[in-house]
Image (cartoon, helix red, strand yellow):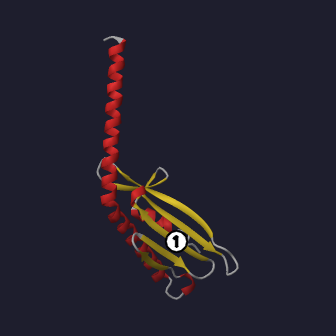
Amino acid sequence: MSWATERAEQIKQHEYSRASNREWQLHSDKMIRAKAPALWASLASAIERDVSEFNKALPDNPQHQIEFQTAVPSGLIARKPCFPALRLTAWLKTEEHTIRFTIAKTLDHDSSARQTTGILRIRLFDDGQLYLLNGERLLTIEEASQLLLDSLLRP
């Protein structure tokens, strides 16, 4: 095979690879848009369950109680209203393939809230399942719940 034929084969392989990648991206986007609401519902349920378990373990200590509520359309809020006050706000961004969150901490009435923001990425793997990633680390629903609630549930 001549060098020119080899070069033509390389171009064909490159174009095939680009087309395959684009097909996967389109498929992945379609599947994430379809399955992300169920993944979000599982995470919101896990967070609500963890908040409930925490509150039941401290029934006589209202200053440590966490309030939980869902927010329309795809968000949630968990907060500890007693100072130092903490507030977790999390929401599904289907079009970005992410779950974004903000944790705000207010030390007292005279302080402004200090905010930390974060992103969990949603990825489709070859097995057809959606997974949450924190950086490059895969998270289970339980691990994601713990990550989001950790600062609210600390002493």
Percent from the top left, x then y, of residue 49?
40, 75
Q: Is residue 142 left or right of residue 27?
A: right
- Looking at the image, the residue that sits furthest to the top is 2
Residue 37 vs 155, above or below: the answer is above
Which image quarter is the N terminus in? Answer: top left
User: How many numbered marks, from 0 up?
Assistant: 1
Kindly identify the residue that appears in the image at 30 percent across and 42 percent down: 23
Element class at badge 1: strand
The one nearer the camera, 60 or 8, is 8
The one nearer the camera, 100 or 131, is 100
Q: Is residue 145 visible?
A: no
Percent from the top left, x then y, of residue 112?
66, 74
Q: Is residue 138 visible?
A: yes
Q: Which residue is mark 1?
A: 88
The one nearer the camera, 5 or 53, is 5
- Residue 105 sits in quarter: bottom right
- Looking at the image, the residue that sits furthest to the bottom is 60
- Residue 61 sits in quarter: bottom right
Q: Is residue 6 left or right of residue 118?
A: left
The one nearer the camera, 110 or 146, is 110
Kindly identify the residue that appears in the image at 48 percent across and 62 percent down: 100
Kindly identify the residue that appears in the image at 34 percent across and 33 percent down: 17
Residue 108 vs 19, above or below: the answer is below
Percent from the top left, x then y, of residue 99?
44, 61
Percent from the top left, x then y, of residue 48?
42, 75
Residue 85 vs 26, above or below: the answer is below
Identity, as a three-letter code, of the amino acid under mark 1? Leu
Crowding at dot 1, Cα within 10 Å, few <14 / some 14-19 / many 20+, comes out as: many
Which image quarter is the C terminus in? Answer: bottom right
Kindly identify the residue that appears in the image at 47 percent across and 78 percent down: 54
